[in-house]
Image (cartoon, rainbow, N blue to C red):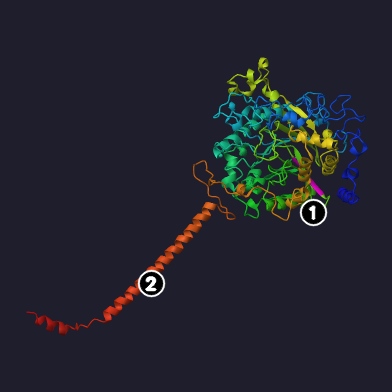
Amino acid sequence: MLRGIIVLCLLAGLPISLCVSPPPPGGGDPSGGGDPSGDPPGGGDPSGHPSGGDLIGNPGDGDPISNGPSGDPIADNLTDGDPIGNPSDGDPIGNNPIHSDPIADDHIDGDSIANDPTSEVGSDDPTSVFRGTFWQITDIHWDQQYSVYGDANKMCHKSYTSTKHNGVYGNYLCDSPWLLVKSAIDAMKEINNKPDFILWTGDNVPHTDDPEPDFTVIFNTISNITEELRSTFQDSIPILPVLGNHDAFPKDYYPVAGEEFYGQYLTRGGWSSILPETAQEEFKLGGYYGYELPIGVTVLVLNTNLYYANNALGVNASDPCGQFKWLKTRLERAQEHKSLVIIAAHAPPGYFERFAEVPFFNATYNDAYVDLLNEFGMIIMAQIYGHEHTDSFRLFQTAKVGMMQSVAFIAPSVTPWYPSTVPGGTSINPSLRLYSYNKTVLLDYSQYHLNLTKANGPSENVSSNQEAFGLDDIHIRGNRLERPEWEFYYQATKAYGLQSLDIVSMVNLYDQLQSDDNLFQKYYLRNSAGFNDGLCDEHCKKSHTCAIVNIKVKDLNRCMGYNHSENYKGLPKSSLKPHKEVPIFIMEDGLPVNFPNTSSSSPLVIAIIVLSMSLTTVLAVILAVMLVAITLKRNRMLRTERSLPVVDLTWVRRQQNYKQIP
């Protein structure tokens, strides 16, 4: 019914929000002049200042976006050309001023961990008895080489020393130190220590190449984080891990294989200690599995790295590891039982919203994946992803304009790393997300983040051996380096004036983001978890709005104005070349594993086969020439023999000749 209304609304040329969602209390309908953030009517400043009004562009009034002296957020943040807004002294951790009240209209009273608003979500709904919560932690990227005195331009590694201090909890130019990882997990427990489950959506090793982390480092990293999560939360709380594209060696390379590869994550990575037997058996097939919650909702954990554009090991397989077939079977089963599913994976399909030219999936897999999920959109409660390091969402729609099927939520990362090589990349304030849900819908989420500048404290007061201390020792009041405070950042429904996070509400939000630039700029600041990148201009805004609803290649190209009759604007061909090293997975006994990959072969194997065939052909030619030469020589010998006189060798003649001998 609702989808029919959406179609009629589009045909009539009306905003979708007028057709599918009533205005939230307090004048949240932007068409009526109310504040879409859900603030009380009357024109009050959402930041809490009685005479403010515009949250954006009012320097000096506590505005989190433009709080610099010039009023120009871009100029104030990037005056020295440093992409993370460092001051002119070149301090690598920079002064990225995040307002003490990050988004004032979303914050309740300035308290951080103590204020968890999820308990209030949906309290006016008498029909919903069950309410649960679950955590998402993603893109941890723990770097074991991180040093407070490492060079920030070289990932803060201890092998490259610097006179500047990086901060014990991290640096916006580098991946996560262990203290940041442990701080994040501890904050999860302090905020909500009894979630229904934890989604851990992949990418645990750093973005380094000096050297690139091999499987020894990968499994050491995964097993340590597994143990930290398991020891922090009760054994009764399920921890559902997801493979990220960096959780393999070489990175991005996931083979069409089975237990000999994926089983190692269970044994050496420690995931056998957190997954039930049934999930483990499915995981061995290709890194995917299902987990049924007590309320009847099934979490389907996928290995979308098999479809990743940079994965050269499965590009020729029609269904890598049989995941498409398995996923369709599980979705059909849920549909038959009239139950809902939550899709969880690391990399989402579609494009990076900050630079909508690079698809995450191989083009063929991308559209097949989207089509399959759209076929079962009615039973998908939500899709949960990481990978991008940013905060955004996606609307899955069919070929029929306006036929929205499901919503995908993309959570920001724990690592603050600024991907300078990625167009549109941004630093991130380390982030965590807590969702609330019931049996039928995703109700809300609360976003938390850590202000690194504030958490690290003044670098000159930090002891040189501070990095060797455990987290419990980091509470030196005199040096202002106490346990870091993970701040409540915003609550989705209150920030955007929504009733819940279902498809209708999120379509309504998308409609508002297109028409209300003030609301869009708030979304853009949240996209980087409060790290101030300045304002988003028209081209930037188009990239976001196109990427949110156009997940297929041709649709995105059409929205952005690219020539979609040509090849999609994807990754450079050079980036799709196989890794120079042959990926060899080493078992615990030290023996290499041979992948039973019949769909795609290693370039080295192909070269060996071609060389063998060539040598066989050359050898056959040589043998043929030798045979001809022998035949010709034999014929000449026979002709010579026929020209010689015949000798009478009878017995009588021999006797006569013998007697004639003197």
Residue 58 locus on image (x, y percent):
83, 28
Residue 367 on the magenta segment = no
Point out the stretch of residues depicted in magenta.
404-409
Q: Where on the picture, by quarter, is residue 273? A: top right
Residue 216 visible, this angle: yes
Residue 519 locus on image (x, y percent):
83, 36
Q: Front-most of 272 and 442?
A: 442
Q: Secondary structure at mark 2?
A: helix
Q: Spatial distance from mark 1 to mark 2, Cα to Cα?
A: 68 Å
Residue matched to label 1: 399
- Dot label at residue 133: none
Q: Nearer the viewer, mark 1 or mark 2?
A: 2
Residue 372 visible, this angle: no
Residue 594 locus on image (x, y percent):
53, 49
Q: Residue at x 43, y 65 (%)?
A: 620
Q: Front-most of 482 and 619?
A: 619
User: Which quadrant is the C terminus positioned in?
Assistant: bottom left
The image shows residue 188, relative to residue 650, as above or below, that is above
Q: Secondary structure at mark 1?
A: loop
Q: Please, what is the dominant secondary structure of the magenta stretch? A: strand
Residue matched to label 2: 628
Task: Characterize the local packing of mark 1: few (<14), some (14-19) or many (20 or more) Cα atoms within 10 angstroms.
Answer: few
Q: Where on the picture, by quarter, is residue 178? A: top right
Q: Earlier in the sequence, mark 1 or mark 2?
A: 1
